[in-house]
Amino acid sequence: MMLGTTRREPRSGCRRRPLRGPRRAQARGRRAESRSMAVLDTLRRLRVYQRQQSSLQLKQAEVERERQAERVQSLEQALVEGHAATSPTDAAALAEYHSWRLRQELNLRRENARLAQRARDVEIQQDRHIKNVREELTLDTVIQARDQQELEEANRAEARWMDEIAARRPR
């Protein structure tokens, strides 16, 4: 060997030979299965996140609807109390009460419209939440079916292997 030159010997195991024949197909199948399981797991996490978000949005919509219902109720109560506090003999007080009552009735109509909108928002959020829960359950069913199928395949492969060993055994 000359000085300054080194000759490297290939390390054993550092270079793998490509798979051929049925082994190659099996390796491809395992890679595809692992990719599909990764996709299913990612979809599962996404569905859980979507369900959680829809649940939070539903709760928020319900709280807003309840607040709006309280506003409507307080306006109705104010109208009732305003009528009781007005003297029927004083014309100026009656005119002022009438003007105030008209403004309050307009406010009440506006708040009732907002309450109806909040109720529609709650229904929409409920529908979204139900849809997300159903999608999550559907995905769970798919994952369980896939796991069951893989278990059955593993059991069949083990049974074939056991049959092969039994066939080799001398009688």
Image (cartoon, rainbow, N blue to C red):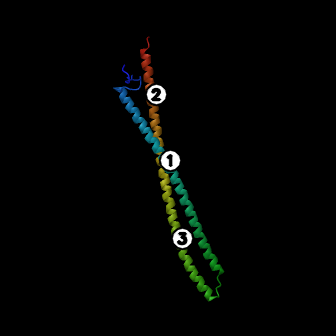
Neighbor class of circle 1 (other Cα within 10 Å; few <14, some 14-19, many 20+) is: some
Q: Nearer the viewer, mark 2 or mark 1?
A: 1
Is the C terminus in the top left, top right, bottom left or bottom right quadrant?
top left
Which residue sits at x=54%, y=70%?
A: 111
For residue 48, say whether it is visible. Answer: yes
Category of crowding for the residue at label 2, using alpha-carbon neighbours closer than 10 angstroms: few (below 14), some (14–19), many (at least 20) = few
Closer to the chain start, of discs 1 and 3, is: 1
Verify CB contact (< 8 Å) between mark 3 and mark 2. Answer: no
Q: Position of residue 112 (x, y in %)?
A: 53, 70
Q: Which mark is residue 155?
A: 2
Residue highlighted by disc 1: 48
Closer mark to the observer between disc 1 and disc 3: 1
Which sits earlier in the primary sequence, circle 3 or circle 2? 3
- Amino acid type of disc 2? Asn
Q: Nearer the viewer, residue 15 or 45?
A: 15
Residue 24 place in picture, x, y as percent: 36, 28
Q: Which residue is most to the left? A: 21
Kind of element beneath mark 2: helix
For residue 28, which quarter of the picture? top left
Q: CA distance from mark 1 to mark 3?
A: 36 Å
Q: Which mark is residue 25?
A: none
- Which mark identifies residue 111? 3
- Image coordinates of residue 83 in percent, x first then y, are 63, 79
Label 1 element class: helix
